[in-house]
Image (cartoon, rainbow, N blue to C red):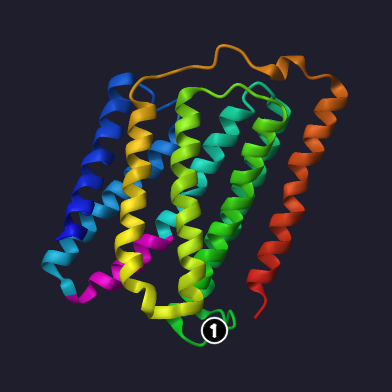
């Protein structure tokens, strides 16, 4: 019963986020974010239909939807980078290209991972480990965006701040839970089925609150950066590539 309450409450909040984006005409301003919300909304509705009409295949489609939404979560990371670096076109383009390249790699690994030995014989455990690793790559980009913002004291709009807080809650809880499930196995399944929807709903409420009105950035300390600082920021941003490549290399090795 609690699961259904969380489920339908999440669908309602997701719908409100999209409705409000249409009212405010903010869809073109945050396309990656709203595409993610629309994808999760469609998944939630379709999974409910599958659960009612074809319960025998519900778990299979749930697993597929989880992987798809985890991959599409990269859109939120791209959105955060795009707005944080909006006044710095060179770094912005580099971060988007890098993010899209990593997205393509992760998507390929996602499609191929069922046939790829990751060191765990049990298929369900392999799935948990793969999801954990994909989200760990997202965590690298997420922390990089926060680090750049804090280091240069960049002004972030209320919309992006809420996006960061909401996604940080969901990402952190999911990575920790997947890490625990990878080692403790099915004994944590009950906690997984209740905790993750609960914290995802908290993230949704945070997003709805922050996106209820559009709040543009009036100014940015980027204007105060001198060329040497630009080079330093470029070096820091491009340095993420090596860390992510190394992580993906560890994922690909048996």
Which region shows up in magenta?
56-67
Compared across the picture, whether 65 is left or right of 151 comes to: left
Residue pictured at 64% horizontal, 72% vertical: 252
Left/right of residue 123 with respect to residue 25 in the rendered view: right
40, above or below 186, in the image: above
Does the magenta segment cover residue 151?
A: no
> Visible in this render: residue 114?
no
Q: How many marks?
A: 1
Task: Determine whether, in the image, residue 149 is placed left or right of residue 112.
Answer: right
Name the residue: 39% across, 41% down. Answer: 35
The image position of residue 61, as x and y in percent, is: 29, 67
Query: Looking at the image, which residue is at 36% across and 58% down?
Result: 196
Main secondary structure along the magenta-highlighted residues:
helix
Reply above or below: 117 against 85: below
Does any portion of residue 225 appear in the rendered image?
yes
* Residue 148 percent across, percent down from the top left: 69, 34
Instruction: Determine the secondary structure under disc 1.
Output: loop
Picture quarter containing residue 29? top left
Whether 65 is among the magenta residues is yes
What residue occupies the far bottom of the structure in this picture?
121
Rendering coords of residue 69 (x, y %): 41, 54
Question: Can you name the residue that lies furthest to the left here?
Answer: 53
Residue 192 placement (x, y as % from top left): 36, 66
Residue occupying image coordinates x 12% and y 65%: 52
Which quadrant of the rendered structure holds the C terminus? bottom right
User: Which residue is denoted by mark 1 in the rendering?
Assistant: 120
Identify the image quadrant of the N terminus.
bottom left
Q: Nearer the viewer, residue 215 or 3?
A: 3
Disc 1 crowd rating (10 Å Cα; few below 14, some 14-19, many 20+) is few
Q: Is residue 51 shown above or below 102?
A: below
Q: Quadrant of residue 152?
A: top right
Residue at the farthest right position: 228
């Amino acid at each position: 019963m609690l699961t259904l309450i969380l489920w339908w409450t999440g669908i309602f909040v997701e719908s409100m986020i999209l409705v409000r984006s249409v009212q405010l005409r903010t869809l073109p301003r945050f396309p990656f974010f709203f595409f993610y919300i629309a994808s999760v909304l469609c998944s939630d509705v379709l999974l409910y239909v599958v659960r009612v009409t074809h319960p025998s295949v519900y778990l299979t489609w749930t697993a597929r939807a989880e992987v798809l939404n985890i991959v599409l979560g990269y859109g939120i990371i791209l959105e955060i980078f795009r707005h944080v670096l909006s006044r710095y076109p060179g770094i912005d383009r580099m971060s988007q290209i890098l993010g899209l390249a990593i997205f393509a790699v992760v998507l390929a690994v996602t499609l191929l991972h069922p046939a790829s030995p990751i060191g765990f014989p049990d298929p369900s455990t392999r799935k948990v480990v793969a999801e954990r690793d994909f989200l760990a790559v997202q965590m690298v980009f997420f922390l990089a965006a926060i680090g750049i913002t804090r280091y240069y004291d960049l002004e972030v709009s209320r919309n992006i701040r809420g996006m960061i807080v909401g996604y940080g809650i969901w990402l952190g809880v999911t990575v920790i839970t997947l890490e625990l499930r990878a080692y403790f196995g099915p004994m944590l399944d009950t906690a997984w089925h209740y905790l993750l929807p609960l914290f995802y709903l908290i993230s949704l409420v945070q997003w709805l609150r922050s996106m209820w009105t559009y709040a543009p950035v009036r100014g940015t300390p980027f204007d105060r950066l001198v060329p040497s600082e630009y080079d330093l920021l470029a070096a820091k941003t491009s340095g993420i590539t090596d860390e992510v490549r190394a992580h993906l290399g560890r994922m690909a090795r048996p």
